Amino acid sequence: MEIGSIIKTARNEAGLSQEQAAEALGVSRQTVSNWETGKTYPDIISVIKMSDLYSVSLDRLLKEESSVKQSYRSFLEESTNTVKSNERKSILALVLTTLGIWALSLLAFILIHTGVDRYGYGAAITWTILPITFFVASFLIGSRNFWGGLKWLSAPVFSLMYSLSGFATYVVTNHSAVQSVIWPDFAKLPIGLAISLAGLVIGTLVRSRKYKKEQ
């Protein structure tokens, strides 16, 4: 039995029409028809959704060696690798963008020579640029579930980055004249942690709500 026949049998046993299945899966009726006739293959995400919708195990849909063509297994492997590759690229882009904004903000402050300008820009860095950057980055990490359970470790990392930014704000302005040692502003740690956790929690809730709507 081909994968298309397996999918069609599972749908019929679930008592669903192609239109009903298509609506629940978020695809067109023609797409469901193409899957069942073998014209196209469903991707791994659609297979998981069908497993839940039709109340059948993934073993039945995929793991019966005598039932599933090797070409479809190759297709699933390729599509899974593509998803993983895209996720890695997204993570890299997010990390580089966040670090870039943080570094450029500090560099711009260092290049400012006027004390009055430093105070104004320092306030912008501390209370606008970096908080927004870390909140948005945390939100994206939560909503995309980057790194799985390890995503919560990004909160203390962003918090530390926020505290280290202190040397480029009022701390530098106050100490540059006497050239004293500049220490990280650890008073900003709880603020940075709160901002990052808020982004992570909201992003995670958005992802959870979106997932429930798809069920």
Image (tube, rainbow, N blue to C red):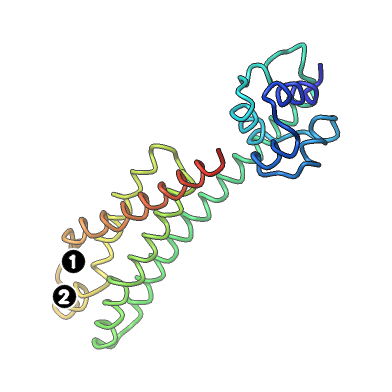
For the C terminus, the quadrant is: top right
Q: Is 150 or 139 nearer to us in this picture?
A: 139
Q: Which residue is mark 2?
A: 175
Compared across the picture, whether 60 is left or right of 177 comes to right
Q: Please give the name of the residue rendered at 59% of the width and 39% of the height, measured from the top-left corner.
A: 84
- The relative height of residue 134 versus residue 59 in the rendered view (above or below) is below
**Rounded to the nearest whole Å, what is the CA distance between mark 1 and mark 2?**
7 Å
Q: Please give the name of the residue rendered at 62% of the width and 21% of the height, measured from the top-left corner.
A: 56
Residue at disc 1, secondary structure: loop
Say which quarter of the image contains residue 194.
bottom left
Say which quarter of the image contains residue 135.
bottom left
Q: Amino acid at mark 1?
A: Ile
Residue at disc 2, secondary structure: helix
- The relative height of residue 19 versus residue 98 in the rendered view (above or below) is above
- Could you classify mark 2 by the number of other residues whose Cα lies within 10 Å: few (under 14), some (14-19), or many (20 or more)? few
Residue 132 in the image: x percent, y percent? 37, 66
- The relative height of residue 125 versus residue 74 in the rendered view (above or below) is below
Q: Please give the name of the residue rendered at 66% of the width and 30% of the height, measured from the top-left corner.
A: 47
Q: Amino acid at mark 2?
A: His
Q: Is 53 or 203 nearer to us in this picture?
A: 53
Compared across the picture, whether 9 is left or right of 175 comes to right
Task: Give residue 139's mark.
Answer: none
Q: Which residue is mark 1?
A: 182
Residue 181 in the image: x percent, y percent? 16, 66
Q: Are marks 1 and 2 in contact (CB under 8 Å)?
A: yes
Residue 111 in the image: x percent, y percent? 35, 80
Q: Please give the name of the residue rendered at 41% of the width and 54% of the height, measured from the top-left corner.
A: 139
Residue 78 in the image: x percent, y percent? 71, 34
Label whose residue precedes the other's in the sequence (1 or 2): 2
